[in-house]
Amino acid sequence: MKTPKDIAADLAIQTLVTQVPAATSLAQAFKTAGFTLALVGGPVRDAILGRLGNDLDFTTNARPAQTKAILNSWADSVWETGAEFGTIAAKQGENLIEVTTYRSESYDPESRKPDVNFGESIEGDLLRRDFTVNAMALELTSSEPTFIDLFNGVTDLAHRILRTPGKPEDSFSDDPLRMMRAARFVSQLDFTVDPSIVRAITSMADRISIISAERVRDELIKTLMSGNPRSGLTLLVETGLAERILPELPKLRLEIDEHHHHKDVYEHTLTVLEQAIALEDRLGGPNLVIRLAALMHDIGKPKTRELIPGGGVSFHHHEVVGARMTKERLRALRFDNHTIKDVSQLVFLHLRFHGYGSGEWTDSAVRRYIKDAEHLLDHLHVLTRADCTTRNQRKAQLLAKTYDSLEDRISQLKEQEELEKIRPDLNGVEIMEILQVKPSPLVGKAYQFLLDLRMEQGPLGREAAIEELLKWWKVNQPKI
């Protein structure tokens, strides 16, 4: 009778041979050259789970120069950007390949870069892996493929639990980013975490400071873009790691007392994130901007919190404060400028819908809503709807109905007026000709006046616009 490891080995081999036949020829190339080659890490895990992709990691006893020579004769293209760490990358067909020499690595307490030592055995290489479910290998250069699982990764995979091959403190000391990877795998794979890992992260959270902001950002993105970001974010908050990388999130756990009631802003935020994800089809699928906006939309509340005499809490202008804080945090995490601008604008606009009472939207208000949102209008629709987390079904239904009405109004006005192309009825050149002035800031003010008029009243037509411009000019022209 086959053991769980035998079954896992059969699954991994069958998936690899079926989906990536090129791995067989690559293994033969290494074997012919006198070296070993094994599929290792995440691809083995994913092969067992039946979700193997085109990104494949291998490990070998060949040194980087020897690996490069083999890949040069096998792959379509080869690059060695990771050669100093023992890794040579290649592309063959649709497959992206990384081959890394057996190694062990450790970090100096103050360094961001590992000291790499090449090893002689796959056993030592697997011991340095982050988690047991990533410390399995499929040796491909033996007489037949051999499954290697020294740390019971198959058992942990079956039980959906994260453990480290050795002591978690040693693993996280070698590479502190592994603490964030734990959160990512919890979210991506729906795993639980061994208590020893939770204790280690809690005691070692400060060590994440030696990791570059770019690497931290990339792990945070992977967690956010997973199927269940709540679980990973919860681990980051509960271990104190979030205080070092995204302190605005744990600060949302505001104190609540019997006299000044308000929603649990932290739980509300996670719920808004989940509800935004559920609406992502409106944006074409998983969307980083909307997930970041949902996560950050209320981060201005702790700084704007005021207790109202007699009971209650207010957060006046938290969207303004939150937008500024969002820019600062995303810049610190090295997000690109386009993402920073879009996310902070959504945070700034997320209350705009509620500023118009229970649906008394004039055409002017609708135009301004569209103009302010610009290309983010669909994102704003999603965020506004996701931001309703009330348990009062009657209130929730009323809010949804009111927003349905707003979207209908937007569609009608868009069709009538092509609102995405809103411009004043006169352009800058025409303004200068009519007023007989040269380019100056005053022309910009005149243009803005006509744009505001367009937003308020809709299309005026050329003659009416000229009449209004001349009226404005009588009041605003320079006095000589």
Image: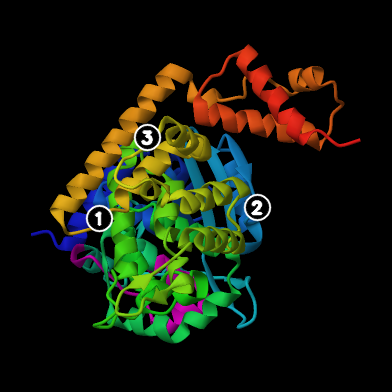
Q: Is residue 262 above or below residue 389?
A: below
Mark 1, other Cα within 10 Å: few <14 / some 14–19 / many ≥20? many
SS class of the residue under badge 3? Answer: loop
Is residue 247 something that shows in the picture?
Answer: no
Give the mark nearest the N terminus, 1 or 2: 1
Q: Residue at x 37, y 69 (%)?
A: 131
For label 2, the residue is: 81
* 172 in the magenta segment: yes
In the depicted view, which residue is nearer to us: 37 or 363?
A: 363
**Residue occupying the far right of the picture:** 480
For label 1, the residue is: 9
* 378 in the magenta segment: no
Q: Which residues are magenta?
A: 158-182
| Image location (x, y in percent) of residue 406 | 33, 35
The residue mark sitting in front, 3 or 1, is: 3
**Amino acid of disc 2:** Thr
In the depicted view, which residue is nearer to us: 180 or 320?
A: 320
Most frequent secondary structure within the magenta stretch: helix
**Amino acid of disc 1:** Ala
Task: Kindly check if marks 1 and 2 are in contact, taking CB atoms under 8 A apart as contact.
Answer: no
**Amino acid of disc 3:** Gly
In the depicted view, which residue is nearer to us: 149 or 85?
A: 85
| Image location (x, y in percent) of residue 235 | 34, 72
The residue mark sitting in front, 1 or 2, is: 2
Is residue 387 something that shows in the picture?
Answer: yes
Give the mark nearest the N terminus, 3 or 1: 1
